[in-house]
Amino acid sequence: MMDALLGDAEVCAVARSARPESEAADTLARVAWGVIAEPGDGVAGALIAQLGAEEAMRVALDDSRFALSDRVIGEAQRRWRPRARPRAVSESLHGAQEVRARLLLPGDEEWPESLDDLGDHAPVLLWVRGDASRLITPERVSIVGARAATGYGESVAAEFAGDLAASGTLVVSGGAYGIDGAAHRAALGVGGGTVAFLAGGVDRAYPAGHQQLFERIQASGAMVSELPCGAAPTKWRFLARNRLIAALGMATVVVEAGWRSGSLNTAGHAAALGRPLGSVPGPVTSAASAGCHRLLREYDARCVTSTAEVRELLGLDANGNGGRGGGEGVRIDPDQTRLLDAMSTRTARSSIELARISGLSEERVRALLGLLSLDERVRSDEAGWRLGVA
């Protein structure tokens, strides 16, 4: 497949047009991976990390490189080969060119490094319509929730998103009906930034009823997908898309969600990544808030009832400033959040005990305690470590 692509002068020309500063081979290989592999394919991610995109593509489609007895590789090859068509890669590039979608690759200046926290499941590339620089906004919050939202849920989502966006925080969501739409609209309404991750190609408005909203997002924010133009949204792709929403946000807030809401999937990714997780409570009799209450009970999510409490999740003060009131809006290390959660103002704990409670290594705990003590956020004595100023 790579030889066919590199031998097609027109395809190479389009690839160079999309990425004039990069080698056409690497660009074509990554676009090809976006065509043949589903989002979050860990086997593809591991191959690319080990061999590079171009060589990984050659290996993936070549029986002689791996014994078919290798079950993992064999199964992956059977997934990839039916899609290994040079024409599909060409169509992907031409489709992006038609809608003026920009191709972002890892290492680019505007590539959001927080997505790399996904490891082998990180995206191979991103297609962006709109302002790609929005993806590296210093402060970012993911606001998600039910499609079939109540007026209460949409009101809370709009209040949070509007207040945060007005102070420069990027609002990240999925472009769906309900909570997602309310968050995007509120951010746009105050002239703030917002990013919508899609489960299909960026040339497809889904849901169709949000066509005008997507046009507004493109004008002052960004629509983003790892799927090629023309790709249709599917149930699996919505779930895979959720990991990007969780990874881009410095914290995730679930505003309203039923017991089996897809928003719980996003929350699960945020928790797995060590991102702060907030949940908005609702009436105990409301099925629309059952998932939020489940997060509070089972996922140890923080109860969030105001914009100020969302800013606490992000490590900001009430004015949107970072740390102890400075104006930089510095991101808090998720490991610091985990360690601080494991500490008490009354009970002193050793570094070994804090490592066990937080799930961090003892070496990491000791390093963080040193940093936090400089900021007077923790104190130590003969009994161990506590929160607060001595």
Image (cartoon, helix red, strand yellow):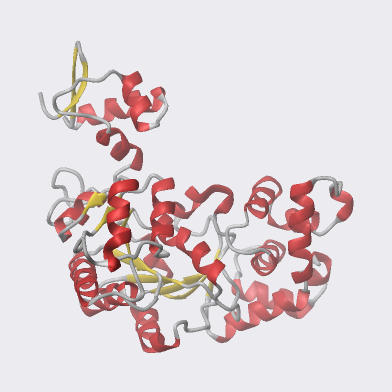
Instruction: Decide: is 370 above or below 296.
Output: above
Q: Is residue 117 left or right of residue 146?
A: right
Residue found at x 40% / y 88%:
209
Residue 149 vertical position relative to residue 390 in the rendered view, above or below = below
Q: Nearer the viewer, residue 15 or 184?
A: 184
Locate residue 174: give its quadrant.
Answer: bottom left
Residue at 21% x, 56% y is 310
* Count of marks overlaid on the render: 0
Q: Residue at x 59, y 60 (%)?
A: 124
Quadrant holding the N terminus: bottom right
Residue 382 vs residue 39: left or right?
left
Left or right: where 331 falls relative to 388? right
Outermost residue toward the right in this view = 64
Percent x, y of residue 171: 31, 66
Residue 120: x, y in percent? Answer: 59, 49
Residue 203 horizontal/vertical position (percent): 53, 83
Report whether residue 40 is seen: yes
